[in-house]
Image: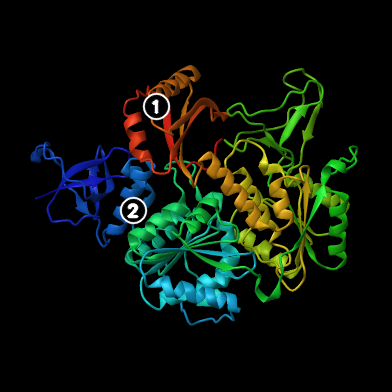
Amino acid sequence: MQRLSVLFPTPLGCFDYLSDTDLTIGTFVAAPFGRTTQTGVVWPTPPDTRVPHEKLKTVLPIPDTPPLPQQSLDFINWVAKYTMNPVGMVLKMALLRGFEKQSAHPTLFPEPNPGHGTIAFSPEQEAAVQALIASADNGFNVSLLDGVTGSGKTEVYFELMAHQLRQSGQILVLLPEIILTTQWLTRFEKRFGVRPALWHSSLTPKQRRDTYRAVLNGTARVVVGARSALFLPFRDLKLIIVDEEHDSSFKQEDGVLYQARDMAVVRAKIAACPIVLSSATPSIETYGNVQTGRYRHIVLPHRFNAAVFPEVHLIDMRHRDKKDRHFVSDELIGEIQKRLTQKEQSLLFLNRRGYAPLVLCRACGERLTCPHCAAWLVEHKKKSVLQCHHCGYTRQKPKNCPKCGETDCFISCGPGVERIYEEVCARFPGAHVEQITSDTLASPKEFEDIAARIQSGAIDVLIGTQILAKGHDFANLTLVGVIDADMGLAGGDLRAGERTFQLLHQVMGRAGRGQKKGVAFLQSYDPENLIIQALSDNDRSRFIQAEMASRRLLHMPPFGKLAALIVSGRDKALTFETIAHIAKKAPFKPDFDVLGPVPAPLHLLKNKHRFRLLIKAPKEEKLQSTLGTWLNQCRIPAGVDVRLDIDPYSFF
């Protein structure tokens, strides 16, 4: 009988079992666990020999299932150690529930044909292709493919993928949002003759099960997915592409907190394969790695096919008539009218869902808030509800004010995309206007249908959120208008300026991608702001230099390390006592700063009170080791949750 350790997708660690046959590390097994039988994985942890042999239960291997590859085991262990999470909780992300059940008619994934389609490259693109291919067979290396919007970055890394497909092994492409796959998949199919395997939350259980097993068996050669695809059990990973590498949605904000872009680099290192990070607006962390020589820098400075970046104009909203209740300026209305006359398309961008972000009583000033979160209720006029965008709570707009009792007294303050849509429809009653947000789209197929209507010219004006900001190529779209360019700059978020620059640069880049010249207008109440000026002048280097100088001065990433500690609980006093206790135990070390405790900006979330500590440390600090020693000295009472966020990206 073989004695072995089995890990389950739980936070409880490994358990010892027996097996009638010798099982290799990574074997999937069915094991008695409590009163049920659970699927676990034979783990390389040595068994605990203190438990008597006769007390151990026996496991059975899952039939017709290859073991979890060694690279997956190494990656799971690495992520668990780095993020300071139990290994079983990371395994949970890599283990698909129900994968043991094999489909009677499993989905087949035809092999992409690297010679199916050909692309005529510009000299800049050809140089980039050759540079990437030259390093493809040199094992692990990281390249930043840095190209302006419309420069043809996708076609360049497609050629690298074709090179790798002619060899052997598997390829992983990470995209930040499911909606981005629509046009991307069409381009992939045109180049390689088939569609790749997909991995995202909208797949059916059968599709997920078939894809998981095809990855495990090695028959899925190219997988395209959201950040969770990083944990799929690749047998022979030979290339990773991270598209839109700067995108904040690569950061997982619940469960195990991790940055998928950074973990993808680790995954590539474990697999000893190249990785390409692609972006028109690289993250400051990635740019810092380029400056230190850790990442290669491959630049595409011009748009493909002689197209140029749109002209950018600022609209100073401080000088508008105070009696004007419209949110779209007269200048922008005039520009939309020009496009309608010329049979061209316009895009209005506002990164705020719903109709209005705030509803208040005109009599007493009472603001309608969520009873479970420290957040205002957002009005969604189309659905006739008020909604909390944090916990999903909804209610009807009350007839009377709950504070003063006044009737029909509520007014909607500020614009959301629904309000902009209403305004544009009123201004242009004959135009075909479409609103596109995550609220209006239920699946990638719905966006595919809308994209087809845009391409056919059936839509004149698009109004939407960041879902429209990147990855889309509409040849007849020549005008982009940003309704509130300053919106993302407020607050104490380390990356507020960076995110604003990236998002607005991306959305402006939707204009003029065909043969027609594009133009972008930014409505701003702070036009002298450095970031607004850099966007207006299309001067990315000025923004990067200023941001890098600021980060260096404050020893913020990439020139230092950050960790956040969030303590939450239903008992406010007990929760604060806990974080105060943790803060008192903080180590005294040079340049090791503990900021707080303070109430979190969102100090009530889903009926739990939240407090935060922010830890700043030098770049050379062994942060996980220091945090582990510190927290092991702290007593955490029942009913209080303590979460660590290594490399935090949000500060809510």
Label 1 to label 2, Cα distance in Å? 30 Å
Q: Residue shown at 77%/17% (left/top)?
A: 404
Q: Residue shown at 58%/36% (left/top)?
A: 390
Residue 239 versus residue 476: which sits nearer the camera? 239
Q: Dot 2, crowdedness within 10 Å: few (<14), some or many (≥20)?
A: many
Q: Residue shown at 61%/62% (left/top)?
A: 471
Three-letter amino acid code at disc 2? Phe
- 510 relative position to 20: left or right: right
Three-letter amino acid code at disc 1? Ala
- Which quadrant would residue 468 be assigned to in this image? bottom right
- 145 relative position to 346: left or right: left
- Which quadrant would residue 488 be assigned to in this image? top right
Q: Residue shown at 57%/72% (left/top)?
A: 187
Give the image location of residue 536, x and y in percent: 74, 55
390 versus 459 height, above or below:
above
Q: Which disc, if any, is residue 586? A: 1
Instruction: For mark 1, give the secondary structure.
Output: loop
Give the image location of residue 634, x and y in percent: 35, 24
Give the image location of residue 572, x and y in percent: 50, 20
540 versus 420 height, above or below:
below
Residue 386 versus residue 517: which sits nearer the camera? 517
Residue 634 versus residue 393: which sits nearer the camera? 634
Q: Dot 1, crowdedness within 10 Å: few (<14), some or many (≥20)?
A: some
Q: Which disc, if any, is residue 417? A: none
- 475 relative position to 258: left or right: right
Instruction: For mark 2, give the secondary structure.
Output: helix
Question: Is residue 435 at least partly visible in the picture?
Answer: no
Q: Which residue is mark 2?
A: 75
Q: Which of the marked residues, 1 or 2, is nearer the chain's N terminus?
A: 2
The label nearer to you, 1 versus 2, is: 1
Give the image location of residue 478, x and y in percent: 77, 65
